[in-house]
Amino acid sequence: MTAAAARFPSSFLWGTATAAYQIEGAAREGGRTPSIWDTFSHTPGRTLNGDTGDIAADHFHRRAEDVALMAGLGVNAYRFSVSWPRVQPTGRGPAVQRGLDFYRSLVDDLLEHGIRPALTLYHWDLPQELETAGGWPKRDTAHRFADYARIVAEALGDRVDLWITLNEPWCSAFLGYGSGVHAPGRTDAVAALRAAHHLNLGHGLAAQALRAVLPASAQLSISLNHHVVRARSDKPQDLEARRRIDAVANRVFTGPLLQGAYPRDLLADTAALTDWSFVHSDDLAVIGHPLDMLGLNYYAPSVVAAATDSHRSGADGSADGHGSGAHSPWPAADDVAFCRPSGERTAMGWPVDPTGLHELLMHYTREAPGLPLLITENGAAYDDKPAADGSVHDPDRIRYLHGHLSALQRAMADGADVRGYFLWSLMDNFEWAYGYSKRFGAVYVDYETQARTPKSSARWYAQLVRTGMLPEPPIRDHGSHGHDDTRRGRNSRLPDG
Ligand code: FCB
């Protein structure tokens, strides 16, 4: 690539991303009621060390300091999520003004610093009362979500112009209701498929509600964790494994969102579980409501193979156990083996493979021509520790980011229309079932004191944002790369986030 092409466009959105339950804390303040994540994290055995988001990074009380941190990085965008139970505690009825006020102040602080807010309506914190009433497997939840979307749009639509309906509906549906490693922790394949449909429907109904309220200039999006799935070999049975995972990981969402229908092969694969009669005749038109941008979250690719006995048991060490656990997140594909590629991994045990990001961007460039793309999450966890002088050096993260942003840049040179990049995450936070054991932040959080310390990756990112050019990463110090995650089996979550 030529030097000129290596500069990112000046209009490029450079951001960091967070989610409400992972950073806010203040779980019982201002009228907020429990979400499914409060219930789940307070249930013994559900999260590592019993960690909860009660306090998290205390962002609710440190909002101004956190916006100042972002201003210090020089970023021009920030992706955050609104906590549904903070603004509409029971998931029904009128909004709590105090809840909305928090987000109004946040957005005002951002705008004052020239940072464009990108608002995610749902990053997994369903009001517990809606789960008690049936949760996402129940159709009504989609309607409740649209009402909530309207409330937030009416309150913030004059100052937020980039809206993301759902974050990673795959995780909500299949980890929440299928494997049960995420809230609400149910393990029912049919409930997971119903949830997937009602999340799709909720997205479509919310998109309609947003359009009705927001100025025409507002941009609507959704953030998918499209799984970059590769077959271990070209053998027909491995290709078939890949097809089945792709159907229930990706096309269950992009079919109705972008193609106007659920994929036939998915309906056939799952026919023994459900006849999909929960899909009503008008739903597909609602779900297909046009998007202005497509948000993609990328962490790592997956390699799959047809099951063999050794894969099934994970005994040969090449499978990561997703297909072999007691409860699978893969309805009708639960015998597919997930292979552990050798090579560098992050502290999550997720492989470091930037080629997957290029592949992902080129996939949508072909499949959804004309639809601008946004990387709404990308980043890595490492076992960051402060040095004696308090500074935090995270060269592995810098190399991860450099590799992935180089891949993104290659994709742009190859024709991908990428408008922005949000680093996951602004700061260390509550990493779901892993609690506080995994640090994804560009800013280190000392959970004892809540002191924030920008890591060296934060300075590296700031330089990138300032110059629009990728700074060179630090040279690898041999022996410091890759970590194995021995707890993976316990909390197993897919590499793709
Ligand atoms: C994604 C989630 C985000 C964070 C990262 C590591 O799946 O959207 O909240 O947990 O993974």
Image: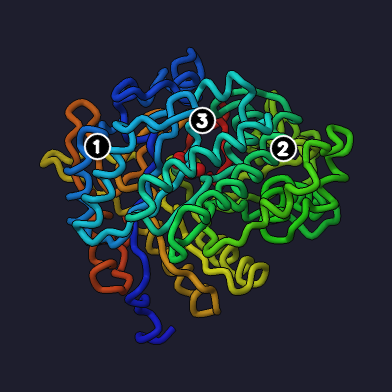
The residue under label 3 is 126
Disc 2 marks which amino acid?
Answer: Trp
Badge 2 marks a residue whose secondary structure is loop
Q: How is the image coloured?
A: rainbow
Nearer-N-terminus badge (3/1): 3
**Residue 46 position in % (x across, y down):** 51, 20
Q: Residues within 10 Å of mark 1 (few under 14, many from 20)?
A: many
Horizontal and vertical percent position of residue 102:
28, 38
Dot 1 corresponds to which residue?
A: 445
Q: Residue at x 41, y 61 (%)?
A: 421
Q: Is residue 421 above or below residue 36?
A: below
Q: Earlier in the sequence, mark 2 or mark 3?
A: 3
Residue type at numbered disc 1 = Val
Residue toward you, 395 or 370: 370
Question: Quarter holding the N terminus?
Answer: bottom left
Q: Nearer the viewer, residue 260 or 187?
A: 260
> Percent from the top left, x then y, of residue 159?
32, 55
